[in-house]
Amino acid sequence: MATTKAKLASALTLVSIVLGFMVAVQYKESQSHSQLTQTYSLTDAKLKQLDDRLKTLQSVGQNEQKELAQARAQLSAYEKQAAGSDASLQMLQAQVTEDRILAGTTEVKGPGISITVTDGTPPAGASAQTIDEYVTHDWYMRDLINELFAAGAEAVDINNVRIVATSGIFCGGPVLWVNNNRIAAPFTVRAIGDAKYLKSALLMPGGEVERLRTLDNLTVSPIETEQSITMAAYTGTTTTSPAGSGS
Amino acid sequence: MEPRHRAAIPITVIAMLLGFMLTVQISSLTGKSSGSSTQDYLTTLTQANEQQQENDLLNTQIAQTKAQLATYQSSGDTVKERREALLKDQANAEAAAGIAPMSGAGLVITLSADQSLPGYSQNIKFFDPQIVLAYLVNLLYSQGAAGISIQGAAGEQQRLVTTSYIRDITQTTIGGESYFSSVEVDQLTIPAPFTIRAVGNASNMQAILTAEDFTQEMQNFGMDCIVTPSNSIKLAGYDGVMPGTYAKEVNTQ
């Protein structure tokens, strides 16, 4: 009996020690977790306030886009008016339009092609390094766009973000940054130009599409010929001329 | 009866401790879901900051366009006055497009093959100017370069614009090693050594080149890379093919 009691007592003591240890560890962990989240102690009200602010900013942004489009359309109308029926002024006005198309600061429309590139499918159980070989990196997009301009594209956009001279394309983790816009895969690149020529330039043996598919392991859609592509104007900062100041 | 009572006490204590642990575990799970609302807050904050930045850029563009409109609204009806208004408009459009020459502070970067560099004999054949120049240009634009040109050995300078492209074209053999030594930039052949001029914030541009270890990377290829800040860089204006054959301006009015 005494042995049984002693055994029971020892067992209970051991269990209590282990339990006590586990309680202490658990409590300490929950304390450090609440310290970590302390800085971001959030209420629904704060989140809602920020959400409202975002919606307001988005609404303001949409109105500003409309205002800018209206102002540009007015400018185009004034230019045509200024040109009137004078041949030399009409030629000047046409040059201004071409300059704006080159700068990317005007909405444009025309025939062309579109192509969509997205990450490839790595083999099951692939290592992180192998998975990286199937990801759409920024340099693939730069190479593709370079090839399109070499083939005579007059305007290019990627996920509706217009490419201009100063456009940088960078990896930002799982997304790409283009002109300070975040875009995510799949990446649809559209180009306005001679569709037949653009398509054959991309599809030539050893060309860009073959390289993206076979060497870069990406998933590339068939190239679509488009009768009419409309591209939004670039709305970032541009260089202005002191000679062109309005006042 | 007595042994049972005695056993009940430690069992009760153990049960209470287990209950306490369960409570702590459940409340830390609740803490984890407030962690996900932290994630929502941070995501929304990032989106709000990005939208604010975009709105600021739009405001700048609206102001510039309205200033150009004011030029037309205040000009008279004579051919001379209308021409002046159009010329002012054209000046802005040419500056934005890269057709107007540009000058200002910035960086000058030269790339030239150097046989004395340790990396030359093994690695020069891997030097691909199309890839390197495109990468360099992207880095410079990321730091706000307002204009960039590429110049070759014969002095020809090509200003980069929206429709610019860079392609490898010919190889050269020096010291028994062949490498791509010429590129085509907008139908202009540009042979090495290459001089890249960028107008913009020199210290920002220099910082990104340092962060990317660009000079060392070039030396590993056997290419000498010299980066020089300058207060008076001049970029030629673009005078190549203009768009407008296929891409037409949309008039919304």
Image (spheres, coloured by chain):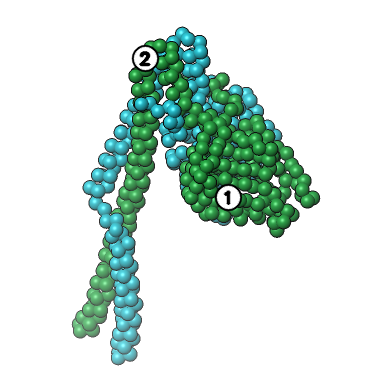
Q: Residues within 10 Å of mark 1 (few under 14, many from 20)?
A: some
Residue B240 x/y as whole percent: 60, 27
**Residue placed at 66% from the left, 55% from the top?**
B220
Residue B151 shows up from this direction: yes
Q: Do the numbered discs 1 and 2 sit on residues whose CB atoms are within 8 Å?
A: no
Q: Nearer the viewer, residue A60 or B178?
A: B178
Q: Nearer the viewer, residue A162 or A83?
A: A83
The residue singled out by tag 1 in the image is B227
Residue A245 x/y as whole percent: 40, 28
Q: Residues within 10 Å of mark 2 (few under 14, many from 20)?
A: some
Chain B drawn in what color? green
Q: Is residue B206 above or below residue B10?
A: above
- Which quadrant is the N terminus of chain B positioned in? bottom left
Q: Nearer the viewer, mark 1 or mark 2?
A: 2
Which residue occupies the extreme bottom position in the image? A2
* Amino acid type at image mark 1: Val
Q: Is residue A242 above or below residue A83?
A: below
| B169 left or right of A4 in image | right
Q: Nearer the viewer, residue A65 or B96?
A: B96
Residue A44 x/y as whole percent: 24, 48
